[in-house]
Structure formats: structure tokens, C-alpha cells
Amino acid sequence: MSSHSSHGAVDLGAVQAPGFEAGRKLSLVAAVVGLAGALGLAAVQEGGWRHLQFAWLFGTMFFVTLGFGGLFFVLLQYITRAGWSVVVRRIAEHVMSTLPMVTLLLLPLVILAMMGNGDLFTWANLDKIRDHHPEELHLYEHKAAYLNGTFFLIRFAIYVAIWMAMARYFKSGSLAQDQDGDPVRTLRMQRVAAPCTLLFALSITFAAVDFMMSLDAPWFSTIFGVYVFAGSFLAFMSFLGLMTQRFENKGYLRGLVTPEHYHDIGKLMFAFVFFWSYIAFSQFVLYWYADIPEETLWFRHRIEGPFKDVSLVLLFGHIFIPFLGLLSRHVKRNRFGLKFWAIWLLVMQAVDLFWLIMPNYDSHHLHWPVLELLCLLSAGGVFTFFFLGSAANHALTPVKDPRLAESLAFENI
Amino acid sequence: MGTVMEAPMSNQDKAPAGVLALFDDVDSLLDACRRMRDAGYTRWEAHAPFPVHGLDKAAGIKPTVLPWIVLVCGLTGTGCAMLMQWWMNAHDYKYLISGKPFFSVPANVPVAFEMTILFASFAAFFGMLALNRFPRWSNPLFRMPEFRRVTADRFAIVVDPADPKFHAGAAFLGEIGAKQVLPVPADPSPAKFPVWVHMVGSLVTMAALIPVALIIRAHYVTSPNPPIHVVPDMDFQWKDKAQTSNPTFADGRAMRKAVAGTVSVDADVDPNLLSYQSGKSTMVDATGTTYRTDFPLPVTKELLALGEMKFGVYCAPCHGGSGYGDGPVHQRAMALETAGWIPPVNFHAETSLALSTGRLYDSIVNGVRGNMQSYASQLPTAEERWAVVAFIRALQRSQNASTSDLPQGMQPKEIK
């Protein structure tokens, strides 16, 4: 059996990342161009400022959910004492460390809600509800103790603080181990990972409720947080597969990552295609069966009218087609196969967020999502800037992790 | 080549069940496996005390066909589940549940999911056993004391006599590094089951038939005793069932109407559609109430299709699919000889044909004094209610048509 003394086997040239200066510059340009384009388009479009708020939320949430996935992946590897994933864990640590920064992109929306602007978060302006939907007013008033600007800002600050603390703790611990190779760090992080997972689950559930479910304030779904989590982790696993291949194509991680690791990434993608489907259908079927008006209204906006097509895209594109596509082990171990489904599922995550957020803007019209894509570009630029910034000048693999040898020798039966 | 063990006396006449070669370490096993594979051996097996990475490849084991078996069985499970639910709910015993269609895919998904998993896991488990040719009642290898160490610190290759190169196997194994090569003595255990196993098996089978027989008997025999209630508080719930009375309320009805002024989320607020007591043309019925006789909506194919669907869901259970008042609820009440049962209205009776459109609408909204309750909440919009009225009119026309209803030029000629 393999011994645990082969740390020195790693070729440091294959793991030491350069500064990524060009990539970081390019991503800043993308962020600025996207933002300028979005602002310009919103200025000329009628009702554009309201549209921009929704599109901004959509674009940012895509990368926030990627961060959720990265954070959870790191916690999961420590809590399960996973061996296979060590060679790719560093990429997850970098994704995780973008989470607080990308979340801060939502701050303007929070401030607008605090100032009583009900364009995006209708609960922020009860006077408008009183004028336009007096029959719903009592539902809003009932929830006002939770859904109000001040408390929203407090919760937002708590989320950012929690995620920043967790991301910093696990990333700095892992980087410090690169220097001293102290296995006690791993043991300590394993212990901390368990309570952190609880905190993670609570924080992303509340965040999902705050930023996406509360767009339709009278509606409620107790499974919503799990739904968002399932999509987040699926999107992150797809991103991890893509990013690992990208680094490998650039000459990093060569000889460290094998088809065995891609196979495991593919297995998690496949599992979460199914988990997402299970959760999405569970949410749907309970409301469908009970058929209670205030519960079904949310789904009516999405399965009657133009968003029916988006729902069908999700049904086939997010459930049936990738399920069959990722079923075979040969696809998961094939570079092109994994890349294809990773891109496919990332697109589906965007469609899913579009489906969650945009019907609250206008469920009667489906337009070309130009503004949404500009916002996605802008938030993506910010995400990439911090991702590459975090990755720069560190080893792309935890070179002195006590389980590195296990990961290098990993083989699926 | 190592020492050859003498076969036990009892089965000297039988051919050996194979050749066993023992190795000291995992590397020489892997090496031997590669050479066996390259030499073209096909019917042989490697044994190790722990899972060895890369052994499949070294032994040239092709990917198993099991995943395909699992996939096919899983899909069969999905198909069976859909077929079963269609047959039960939409064909053999049509039973309305919360106004859903008889065959509705969302309701069928959970069962289809479970059946898919069940079939697939059975296929995986039993398919694995079958592909490994299990269960086997005895294995000659387990009778060899040398083989026991394969569960601790030895590695082995066993060649099956069915291998075309079996005759050269023993010598070849010695060449490729086996520390010991032994013939596997043929299995001395009898191929047939002992008689007592047959006896016990038959007895157990017969005993297992007793509950089945009792269930079949219960199906045909009546009993004067009341049924056994295993969970009485579920069978007798502290609630009022539909269509029963409750003296707490002034009108004695257990089913309560919606609070006055309740407006459905989807309610059509066009007052012209709601006021069935005033229209362009009206009539006064026997009770002295005025009802409209005209129809406030344009009658289109879509409206009639909506009416047909809603009629099928809410009206047909009592009034029957053709409107003769002979729906399954009525037939059941007749079969049970329910006391005080008021038969549902036959829409083709002369009194029904004379009912105004407004009166039909009123019946849907407020119910009828007999035992029909209000269907206002089931048919929340005025459009749905008028659609049902239109469909009743179409039904009446279909059963009471005259030759003058035929299009011009298609009237039958008078028979002389």
C-alpha cells in the first residue's frame, strides 16, 4: 500500500501560480464595461432603473452562489476527512474567498431597500402596496417585523461577517500549512468545520430567503434555502471541473490531477443534478397538490405566460438531459464530456436564477436578457478579479497537506 | 513448480476443479495477472485479502454489463409505475382526488421515482449475484487449507478447467512466479439436496399459503361481526364529512359556505357575468324568482371545451357523463340503498330542459335545496360557471336533437 511519506513528490513548478496580472486586468475591464453598459442601457430604457436592480441581483447572485458552493466544498472536505479532493481543494478555497467581496456588490440594493425604494424589494415600501395592492397589505404588515430595511441591513452585515470569517479561517490555515506542513492544522480545521457547516446552512438559507424569496413577499417556501443550496453546489462543482481543466491546459497541476479526480467531480455533479431535481420537484408537487391560491401564485407566474418556456428549459435542461448525459462513468472520465456538461450546467444555473428572480420584474413579458447579461459580465469581472487575486502567488495545490499522498494515489475501483 | 498435494481419497475419480497458484506479495500477483492476460487465459480468477487498485486492468477484466442491466430495469420500473397508476386511477377505478385529472403526471412522479429506484436496486443486487454465478452452495476452494491464508497474507490465482489453455496452466503459473501450485480437489459434497430440506421447504411453502387462503376466503364470505378497527381514531375522525348535517349551525349543514363577500384571487369582476338574475331576456320561474335566459358570453369551441372538462370533473360524478343523473355516486348510493338519497337531476327531463341559463348558473353558485352543495369555490370564475352552463345546454341538445338541427341539405328525405 502507498506510504504517507511522499510529499516531496510534487513538482513545485507545476503548482506555483504566477501573478495572473493580464487576467486580472482583463477582468477589471470586463467589470467596468459590463457596469457601464448596464448603466447606459438602464438610462435609455423606460423603467430601466427598476429593471437594472433585478438584473444586478441576477448577475451578482450567480457568483454569490458559486461562492456558496466553494465554501461548502471546503467545509465538506474537512468534515468528512476526504482524501481524494486535496489536489483540487485549493481552487475551492480561492472561490470561497471571493464570497464576501462579491456579496458586497449587493450593498447598493440593500441601501435602496433601506431608503424605502420598493422597486426590487416590494416590502420596502408599504405605502406603494397600500395604494396598489391593498388586499395584500396585511400579508406585508404581518412580515414587516422581519422584512424591514434596518433589519435587512443588519442581516446583510451578519452574512458578510460570517462568510468572511469562515473563508479567512480555512484559507489562511491551508496556506499556512503550505509553509510548515503541520498536520495539527488539519485536525483543528476538521473540528471547526462541523459547527461552521451549521452556520453555513443557516446563513445561506436566510440569505436565499432575503435576496430571492422576499422578492415575492407574500409567498413562502420552507425548502427554498435547500433549493438554492442544491443549485449552488452543482454550479460550483461544474466550475471546479472547468477550472481544473483550464489550469491543466495552462500547464499547472500537470501530473497531479488524473481522470480519477475528474471522475469524482463528475460524480458529485451527477448527484447534485439529481438532488436539485428532487428538491425542485418536492417544492413544486406540494404546492401543486394542495392547490392553495396564495401558494400557487408564485408558480403561476412561472408556468403560465412566457415563463412557461423557461420552466420547460429547466425541466429538460436542468433535469432530464444532464441526468442522462452524466449517467455514464465514461463521460465523467472524458475531458470533453466533463467540460461540456460543466458548461451546460453553469448555463442552467444562470437560467435557474433568471427563473427565480426575473418573473418578479415582469412575468408577462420575456425579453432578450441583454441587461441581465451585462450585469452578469460585470459581476463576473469582479469575481474573476478576486479569484485570480487570491490564486496569485500561491501554490495551486496544498503542497504539504497530510492527505496529499492519498489524493495523488487516488483511484476509483 | 511447487509441491503437488494429493487429492482426498473420496473423490479421486473426479477431475480437479481447477488449479490454485499462491503468491507472496501483491506485486508478483499483479505481474502474474498481466502475464496470464497476455498469454490469452480467459477463465481464471485472482484472489487477494484486500482490494487491489489496478487489478481489474492487470487481469484484463472488461467493464461489466451490470450498469446496462440496471438502466434497463430502472426504466422498466418507471414504465411499470406509470402503467400501474394509469390503470388504477384512470382506467380500472376512476376516483377523483382534489379535482385533479385522473391521470396527472406530477402526482405520479413520486411513485414512478420509488419504483425506478426499487427496480434498479434489485437489478443491481440480483444482477451482481447472477453475474458472479451466486448463490453457490459450496466452493471447493474453501476445503483447501492453503486457500485460507488468502484472507490474511497470501495472494492467489485460480484457473478454471473450462479455460481452453487449462492443461498448460499449472506449468505456466510456476513459470510466472507462483510460490506454490496445487490442483483444486473436486467438490465432494453431493449435488442434490438432502430429503429433509425438501420436506421443510414444502411445509414452509404450504404454511405460507394459509394467509393467502384466508384473504381469498374473506373476499367471498360475509360475516355478521363488525370489521376490526386497527386504528380507530383514524377510522372514526372527530370531524364532519361532506354532505352530512351538523346541528350546531342554524341551517344544519356541516359543509359551510365561504364567508360572504369572499372573492377568489382569479374572480372575474364583470358584474354583467355575475348577475344571473338580470339579463337582456329574463323569465320568472315557479318560485317567483327572475332568471336570465340569455347567455352573457360568446359561445366558442374553447368555452365548450372548458365546460366539458369542468363538467367531467365536478358534475359527472353525480349527474353522469351524459347528464342523465346516473353518475357513479348515484349508482353507489343505490347499491348501498342509502336512506333519504335524493337522485341527482336528469338534465334531459322536461323540467330540466325548461330551466333558464340563469337558474342553472344559480344552482352552480348556491347549490340546490336537495343535496347539491355550492360549487362556487370549485368553479371560482364566472367564465368557468357559464362554460359549464353552455356545456349542459350542448348536452341537452345532443340528446334531444330534431332533424331541423341538421345543416341545410343534410335533412333526411321523407319516407313515402
Image (tube, coloured by chain):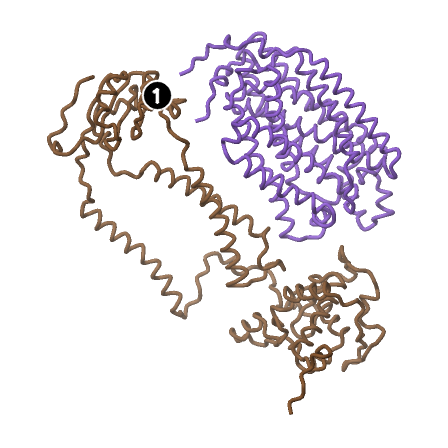
Chain colours: A purple, B brown
Question: Residue A233 falls in which quadrant of the image?
Answer: top right
Chain letter behind tag 1: B
At 54% from the left and 71% from the top, the residue drawn is: B332
Secondary-structure class at tag 1: helix
Question: Residue A390 falls in which quadrant of the image?
Answer: top right
Residue corresponding to mark 1: B34
Question: Residue A67 falls in which quadrant of the image?
Answer: top right
Question: How many discs mark residues in the rendered view?
Answer: 1
**Horizontal and vertical percent for residue A123?**
80, 40
Check the picture and name the quadrant holding the C terminus of chain A.
top left
Check the picture and name the quadrant holding the N terminus of chain A.
top left
Amino acid carrying label 1: it is Arg
At 77% from the left and 43% from the top, the residue drawn is: A366
Residue B145 to residue A145: above or below? above
**Horizontal and vertical percent for residue B206?**
28, 56
At 29% from the left and 55% from the top, the residue drawn is: B207
State the residue lying farthest toward the bottom: B416
**Horizontal and vertical percent for residue A58?**
74, 34
At 75% from the left and 74% from the top, the residue drawn is: B359
Crowd class of label 1 (few under 14; some 14 to 19; many from 20; radius 10 Å): some
Would you say B35 lies left or right of A191 here? left
Residue B246 to residue A335: above or below? below
Would you say B159 lies left or right of B72 here? left
Q: Pick whichever, B403 or B79, lies toward us.
A: B403
Residue A289 to residue A371: above or below? below
Q: Pick whichever, B48 or B262, lies toward us.
A: B48
**Horizontal and vertical percent for residue B215?**
38, 61
